[in-house]
Image (spheres, rainbow, N blue to C red):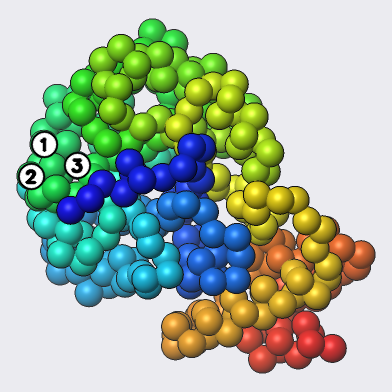
Amino acid sequence: MSNFWNELPCPFTILAPMENVTDYVFREVVSTYLPKPDVIFTEFTNIEALTSEGFEKTIPRLKFSEKQKPIVAQIWGTKPDAFYKSAQLIQKLKFDGIDINMGCPVREVVKSGAGAAMINNPSLVKEIIAAVKKGADKLPISIKTRLGDTPAMTTEWFTFLLEQKIDAFTIHGRTAKQMSKGNANWEEIKKAVRIRNKIAPETLIIGNGDVESYSQILDFQKKYNVDGVMIGRGIFKNPWVFNHIPQKHTEEDYIGILLKHMKLNQKENTSPKAFEPMKKFFKMYINNFKGASILRQKLMETKDFTQARKLLET
């Protein structure tokens, strides 16, 4: 089995895992109708749910199409045995890689000992990485995390993770306490590059935080020496963010993508509640053109796909 990480250009681009955003439908939209990044991550998926009675409800999060490849399944939790079993499943599903979330700052996740709480529990982290490697067989393993609360803690944390000989290492340039506030600290991300060069030269370093254009990706790669750049919220400001050549887009372009997104969402989600989650995408698509704010307000007042479609097509 080839390691896809080693076949990517430099700098490569990644669509970040975002809860209730990067579901199958959104990933399919990005892979079909928008400039596609080099790598796509799933939403983060709980390994305890994946290996228990919650399996049937959880497994749809790992649905993907060939268009979305190379695709990485991101998982989270605290139990090494469940990580092992989940890694076995992900390998059987033919994902291209497995990513372990060690950076989620959400209170409920941290309180459970998962996500960013892992920064303070290296002994458990070592067990988890070993369990995932064993379950994944030869599937490449990556980790996504954040900065420690102090520069010294960050250095210690990055050093420890890089000693585990992982294939790729993504750093969001904020602490867990910052959540998404303040500016991402890319100088601390560069610190990981320096540590990597000394102890784990084969591990790829990916920077994440405050990137909103491809030109910025090129600038950050040159300035901070990362191998790749991950974009999350930036795609909400510009759906075409992964386009290598900047282009202006018309009102028809934005509305056209939204209509395609709604059509696919309606096809994949038969639940009567499927429409409401679509509303978080209205600001993404109905933006940057004259009259967008008024149209967006009207869309937010619609009750179902039919009403929204009629409004957009008039």
User: Quick check: 270 left or right of 36?
Assistant: left
Determine which residue is flagged by label 2: 134
How far apart marks 2 and 1 lie (CA) works out to: 6 Å
131 above or below 68? above
Residue tagged 3: 78
Picture quadrant of residue 50: bottom left
Q: Is residue 313 above or below residue 112?
A: below
Give the mark nearest the N terminus, 3 or 2: 3
- Assess disc 1: are there few (<14), some (14-19) or many (≥20) residues with their C-alpha within 10 Å of its C-alpha: some
Q: Residue at x 20, y 28 (%)?
A: 165
Where residue 307 appears, as percent x and y from the top left, is: 71, 89
Q: Quadrant of the C terminus?
A: bottom right
Residue 160 image offset from top left, x and y in percent = 24, 19
Residue 2 point in image, percent of width and height: 23, 50
Q: Amino acid at mark 2?
A: Lys
Viewer-closest of 21 and 279: 21
**Mark 3 secondary-structure assignment:** loop
| Badge nearest the viewer, 3 or 2 | 2
Residue 156 visible at all: no
> Circle 3: is it few (<14), some (14-19), or many (20+) Cα within 10 Å?
many
Badges 2 and 1: C-beta atoms under 8 Å apart? Answer: yes
In which quadrant of the rendered view does residue 310 lie? bottom right
Mark 2 secondary-structure assignment: helix
Residue tagged 1: 130
